[in-house]
Amino acid sequence: MNMRYPLLLLATLLLMNLADANELNCGVHRPQEVLWVEGPTAVIFDTDMWSDIDDMLALAMLNTLQDRHEVNLLAVTISTDDPWCASYVDLVNTFYGHQQIPVGIVHDGMSLRKFREKWPQATWPLTRYTEIVSQRKTSDGRLLYPHRLTDGKAAADAVFLLRKTLAAQRDGSVVMIMVGYSTNLARLLDSKADAASPLGGRDLVASKVRLLSVMAGSFRQAELNGKTLPRGTPETNLVVDVPAAQKVFSSWPTPIVDSGLEIGLEMRLPGQSIAHDYSYVENHPIADTYRTYCDEMKKADPKIERCPEDHDHATFDLTAVLYAVRPDQHYFSLSKPGKITVLDDGGSRFEETPTGQHRYLILDDAQKSRTLETMTMLASQPPVRYDTPIQASVRNATKP
């Protein structure tokens, strides 16, 4: 294993964290309202974990942050009604040594059948990585990536798990991260008092949650495959369940910070990192997934000849994780306060208002390289069980 590259990244990050944060002040609002809480940040991660791979890279980041004692990942809930998604999440958590993290899944939500009914001209799913990687076998027939939840149908109901998890936390202590469809969180808001809590869903959220970090929508012009996407362009996480997204953005009782698609498109995780930085173990589920996705996309993208080297992937969901866990590290700037409205076509509109609880992320050129480097490093850091003494010492030295 060649450790030089990841160690250089860690050393560089340490030096950059010591830089004067005032040099990054470019005249836009900074994240002052979301205060740093001493100790690991209590996090609930809600993801679709389907059709794209930025979700799995974001989950890898969270597992790394768990190892670094920056987060306490309380639960992962899934907004796609496909049992393989639950199996895959458990597989990744288990690989990192965090098999105790409970996994919940939506029931009667967006499924493969419903996708095909809603978009009959599209080919769904775009990738089957959750099913493929979950079933990988060794030559003697054992699971290549052992995990407990081999039947995703056994996963808990997402809203039940959300209510149970929130009820057990201190007031105002939880950061929720939503990087998929809004189905689970909308149903949480509508949930009634039960054995977990005498509070209805909205009151339970208001009591326990201090921030919702979201990847959804579009708030600035972006470029994709040579095409210009105007601000407010309909975005997948909103389009899939528009009524749920409208409910969350109109009724959620805590501050919301949203990473629009333009942020992830500006920073692409390099395929070279997948080829080199995950080689500390022969079989790595993150690298395996990335290659699986790349191989499937190769058929439609003539620019891809080698996988994973020729595919750099947009960091959509990773940006929402990074802000949620390190809001005061100046990886991003923030818009002024306002109100995000989800339109009927899955587009989004932001209106400034001094009393608004919504903001969106802004990325300037001075922040870009450091932010991308940090996400790349966190996604590729080996689990603690693969640590060498020098890796552990460098990791501890680079805590924010």
Image (cartoon, grey):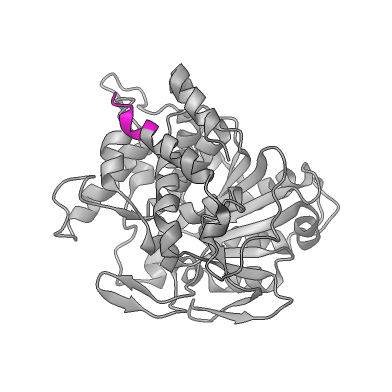
Q: Where is residue 296 shown, x and y percent of the image?
A: 23, 51
Q: Where is residue 126 shown, x and y percent of the image?
A: 31, 58
The residue drawn where x is 35% and y is 22% is 142
Is 322 one of the magenta-colored residues?
no
Quarter of the image with the C terminus is top right
Is 2 one of the magenta-colored residues?
yes
Determine the image quadrant of residue 205.
bottom right
Determine the image quadrant of residue 366.
bottom left
Quarter of the image with the N terminus is top left
| 189 lies above or below 9 | below
| 2 lies above or below 260 | above
- Residue 48 in sight here: no
The residue drawn where x is 58% and y is 73% is 243
Is 38 left or right of 291, judged from the image as shown?
right
Is 199 left or right of 312, judged from the image as shown?
right
The residue drawn where x is 38% and y is 51% is 53
**In-front residue for pair 353/260:** 353
The number of callouts visible is 0
Work out which residue is located at the far right of the displayed protein and give it.
198
Q: Where is residue 104 shown, x and y percent of the image?
A: 59, 45
| 273 lies above or below 345 | above
**In-front residue for pair 267/286:** 267
Is 385 left or right of 304, judged from the image as shown?
right
| 313 lies above or below 226 | above
- Residue 276 in sight here: yes
Magenta-drawn segment: 1-7
Q: Where is residue 117 shown, x and y percent of the image?
A: 40, 69
